[in-house]
Amino acid sequence: MSSKYEVTIGMEIHAELKTATKMFCTSKNDTSETRPNVNICPVCLAHPGTLPVINKEAVRAVLRVGTALGAKLADYTEFDRKNYFYPDLPKGYQISQYEFPLVSGGTLNGVAITRVHLEEDTASSIHDEATNATLVDYNRSGVPLMELVTEPVIHSAEEAGAFARELQLLLKTIGISGADMEKGEMRVEANISIAKPGENLGTKVEIKNLNSFRVMERAVAYEIKRQEELLESGGKVLQETRGWDEKKQATFSQRIKEGSADYRYFPDPDLPSLKISEISEFSAAELAQSMPELAWQRRERYLALGLKKDDAEMFVRDQRFGSFFEQATNGMAADEIALAANYLANDLASHLRTREDLNDESRESVRRDSINEADIGISADNFAKLIRFVAAKKISSRSAKDILKIALDTGSDVEQIAKERNLFQTSDTGAVGKVVEQVITDNAKVVADLKSGKSAALEYLVGQSMKALRGAADADTVRELIRTKVSS
Ligand SMILES: [Zn+2]
């Protein structure tokens, strides 16, 4: 989109943390619970006289995010009350962090991070059509929620999408959040402003309730265009919150902002402040040790192995293919690894797509929910065996594609399939080829008989060859080899 305006986007992303219990009580933290008001207790219902207790697991999760981002981890931190009234907030305040977030700075996908802090989620209000009433479900009240805020350094819908996807991947890789947008485990807000280059930042418009990456990218692109057109026609951008209308494929105004709300933050007197350096399981060494291989590290390793950029990206993003690739290539030489990547990303992936018969949308959700090696349809060992045959030129790449398809359909061993179908390569190189050539040279009369159509001659030559090879060859392969050589 060429434009005389400069687009500036900052993002705020919330993610529910996958801890056993809630942020300040021992109620179960289960985002998949569908029955309302099951995982609740007097603390998360805000009964008078109850006291919150900090969930260490949640604090550690945010510190791990900070470690992965290369950010500064707080030494001193505290929890603050953010005061506002809403039916889904029984206490009349949300416990959050204001002046002393757990994490500040760091970068992800080239985007500078401002801060990451920890807070509690609110309950959910549901409008009930039957009774025309608003009902409240407290299951999510008090679920630990991480909020990450970026600097306003993103300049397009694509960059915004790439950032959010990379963050989702990070949260899933380090295992601290399901980060499923459709389940509301990850919520993205984008603040967009446009201005002519050199001018001050334009008016900030916030888009909320974006429940998928696709919706997010469309909403951001739409909003950039809307603001440009508005300014072009001499209009003025209002500071407001907008939502996304899926039917109209457009953003719409939800709330005009007049000044910023005053939440009267103050430290929660019911909670102790924390001195992170005094808590042994929060030490930098301990946190660093808990890091698995991160997406960017894995990408780098794959590229160093000579994988194509797209293939590497696929294995990094799709845990199903990623773990299969890791298993299959364990102990392989470089040329075999490159071959395995190629077969996995192209042949195997395309078979699976046909099999799953899915469009892009649902494929994304299948990938998210069923990260399972069984879905690949062939064991990593069996696949690796096939790759080794191809690398050693024992099987042609044409045959390998057929064998792969049969293995996927029948679950049979690739070597078995190749034998049964005579697909082992009849190559002139190697010991078998040399022996067969010698036998042909030594038995000119038998070869002549074979050429004149005496089929018994073939079996004689096979027998001679097998004898010379001391049985260390596949008779079918030898037979095929003799046929080819004699007829050529
Ligand atoms: Zn509770």
Image (spheres, grey):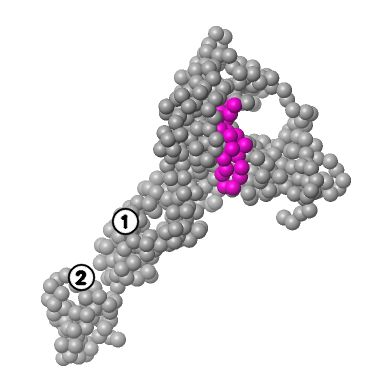
Q: Main secondary structure of the magenta part?
A: strand
Is 104 or 362 nearer to us in this picture?
104
Is 208 or 176 nearer to us in this picture?
176
The image position of residue 479, as x and y in percent, is 22, 77
* Residue 15, above or below 454: above
* Residue 3, above or below 108: below
Residue where numbered disc 2 is placed = 474
Is the residue marked 2 within 8 Å of ligand 1, measured from its CB? no
Magenta highlight on residue 102: yes
Amino acid type at circle 1 is Gly
Q: Relative to residue 448, is residue 231 drawn left or right?
A: right
Q: CA distance from mark 2 to mark 1?
A: 26 Å
* Residue 436, above or below 17: below
Secondary structure state at the residue bearing disc 2: loop
Is the residue marked 1 within 8 Å of ligand 1, measured from its CB? no
Name which of mark 2 and mark 1 comes first in the sequence.
1
Q: Which mark is residue 331?
A: 1
Q: Relative to residue 145, is residue 28 drawn left or right?
A: left
The image position of residue 297, as x and y in percent, is 46, 49
Residue depicted at x 46% and y 19%: 26
Q: Quadrant of residue 85?
A: top right
Residue depicted at x 55% and y 35%: 72
- The range drawn in magenta is 100-120
Q: Quadrant of the N terminus?
A: bottom right
Q: Quadrant of residue 249?
A: top right
The image position of residue 252, as x and y in percent, is 74, 38
Q: Quadrant of the C terminus?
A: bottom left
Does residue 354 show up?
no
The image position of residue 11, as x and y in percent, is 64, 39
Is 358 or 175 nearer to us in this picture?
175
